[in-house]
Amino acid sequence: MSHLSEEQLMLHYYREGDESRHLDSCPACRNEFAALQAALDAADDLPVPERGAGYGGEVWRRIAPRIAARPRTRVIQFPRWAAIAAVAAMLLLAFYAGRFSRGPQPAPATAIPAEVRERILRVTVGDHLERSQRVLAEVVNSEDPVEPERVEGLLSENRLYRQAARREGNVPVTILLEELERVLLEVAHAVPDDRGRVRRLIESEGILFKVRVAGSTLRDKEKIWKVKSWL
Amino acid sequence: MEWTDQEAVERVRTGDSDAFRVIVERHSRNLFRLAFRMTGNEPDAEDCVQETFLRAYRQIRAFDGRSSLRTWLYCIAANYSRDLIRMRQRRQERIQPPDAEAGDRIEALPAQAPLPDRVAWSGQVREILGTAMDRLSPLERSAFVLRHHEGKRLEEIGAILGIQPNAAKQSVFRAVQKLRRALQPAMGVR
């Protein structure tokens, strides 16, 4: 009698196959199945942290501002100057909103002051946007593939900055980094045949333009801050 | 008012973003469990839950109702988790090579061992399993979680992960083999 394969035993375990008759009559396969069963049953014990009944409400509170901020209908094409002004205004608004919307609770002694946090975010995100802009421009304009490590590095950074911007309640920067992350993911996972599609995606999302405008706004703000600090 | 998922989706499509709250509150806990099992850590799981809902909201018009809303959300979460795992594994590979000795760290437990030893042993088994799960490829891990923990059929797993059912079966099978091999020293199985 031929014995059951490991794959057949697995399918039997998951009830995607029925080998009961063979198992009833074959002690060797029965032992093998018991061993597989013990190993897979152990996976049931892997702990998962519990989330309470109010968890859905918590998630909603975290994402609701971003849903409210997101346009639901197709975006109308504005002239370029209007887009630049809008992005700049959103960034300014976000920074000042962040500065003045803190609640009355006292900051812990070790907390980094809001102004410093703001500046760190401004400098690091500005630098990140500049590097992302270079990579996206290479994808659009060059036939040479971009080194995967560069894109992976940008993705990792992007994720960190997006989380930081979200924590700071900086909705425009969060949304911009979210859009950038989607495009970087496409670039990272694109095979050579996908290059045309990825280029079209970059162009249709206008992400290169948004990144350029936001990066330049952040740099301008940093210059103003430096001039003010010298006076 | 208690809307069905489909009713809530229809309302979101007509511009009622509050209806999306019903969807978020109804599915968050299940999505967190799935995301935690797929990513193996809380910050990534939290990130995955939020990102899943944001993507779902953006793409709500693409939901055609052929699968349940829950399956559609699982699809988004599973694919986002795979991206997270892929990025994390590439980062780790650059930092440190895989630890080939991890599977040999524990001894098999005699069947009649006293209770404290048994408790310690099961803790070690969990640790080995956790490490072994982290070493699965993103596809293997996703397919295994969907089959083993979520009870999805292979056809459903294929649909969720965008692969053929046979590829889903092979992914689950490879995951099972790897987990089993990792547990051999602890469980004294072949």
Image (cartoon, rainbow, N blue to C red):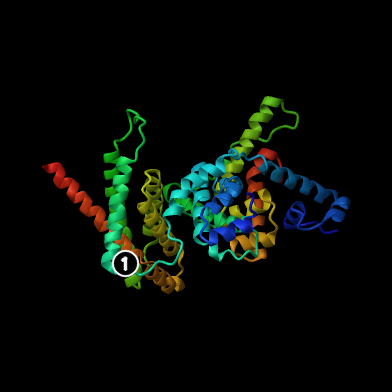
Report whether A184 appears left or right of B154: left
Q: Residue tagged by mark 1?
A: A137
Pick whichever, B118 or B185, lies toward us. B118
Image quarter for residue A206?
bottom left
Q: Element type at marker 1?
A: helix
Q: What residue do we see at 64% from left, 30% from top?
A: B120
Image quarter for residue B165?
bottom right
Q: What residue do we see at 70% from left, 44% from top?
A: A39
Pick whichever, B90 or A105, lies toward us. A105
Report whether A116 appears left or right of B46: left
Q: What residue do we see at 30% from left, 64% from top?
A: A83
**From where the camera sits, is residue B36 visible?**
yes
Pick whichever, A120 or A42, lies toward us. A120
Report whether A132 appears left or right of A9: left
Indicate the position of residue A183 as horizontal and vertical percent values. Answer: 41, 62
Pick whichever, B176 or B88, lies toward us. B88
Is the residue B115 above or below the residue A169 in the image? above
Indicate the position of residue B151 as horizontal and vertical percent values. Answer: 69, 52
Indicate the position of residue A61 as horizontal and vertical percent values. Answer: 48, 44
**From where the camera sits, is residue B101 visible?**
no
Indicate the position of residue B17 as horizontal and vertical percent values. Answer: 51, 55
Q: Total of numbered circles in the picture?
A: 1
Callout 1: 10 Å neighbours few (<14), some, many (20+)? some
